[in-house]
Image (cartoon, helix red, strand yellow):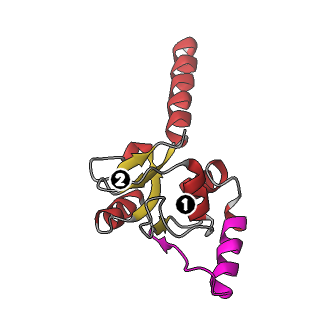
Amino acid sequence: MIMKRTIGATLFGALLSLQAVAEVVVVVHPDNQATITKQNVQRLFLGKETAFPSGEVATIVKQPATNPLRAEFDGDVLGRNTAQVSAMWAKLVFTGRGIAPQEVETDAKVIEFIQGDKNAIGYIDSASVNGDVKVVNLD
């Protein structure tokens, strides 16, 4: 009986830890034909570029600093923590050298935003990907 409980608790814990690990993916409108690299994504989300390699002006959409997916994106993709990214954008906006990205609360709202703007780029949990967005390969 104790063995069954131990195994059950271990399996339950393993399932919870798998759920807690979200895989962030960068997404664009399905009609976006630009070839986008990880460096392009970094430069767009850090305010160093304003357009896709195709020349189309990009509309950046991000999630709030309180969302764990934002911290994962900022760290894994941008190589910075959320406070650094927020401070950098504040400086760009204050000096007039940048326009702050749009901010929405959830993956569903990111997808909805991208559906309405073919030049939008954002990030969501891979589990939220559907036919309304195209995943950007960052390899």
Report the side of 75 relative to 34 (left or right).
right
Query: Looking at this view, is 48 or 19 the one in front?
Result: 48
Question: Which residues are the magenta region?
Answer: 84-104
Determine crowd level at label 2: few under 14, some 14-19, many 20+ residues with C-alpha closer than 10 A.
some
**SS for callout 1:** loop
Reply yes or no: does residue 137 show up in magenta: no
Residue 67 tag number? 1
- Mark nearest the camera among 2 and 1 is 2
| Residue at which label 2 appears | 33
Query: Would you say residue 68 is visible in this rendering?
Result: no
Label 2 amino acid?
Gln
- Along the viewing direction, whichever of 104 and 100 lies nearer the viewer: 100
Marks 2 and 1 sit apart, C-alpha to C-alpha, by 29 Å
**Where 126 sits versus 67, above or below?**
above
Residue that appears at 56% across and 56% down: 40
Q: Tell me if residue 137 comes above or below residue 121 in the rendering.
A: above
Residue 82 x, y percent position in the rendering: 67, 62
Amino acid type indicated by mark 1: Asn
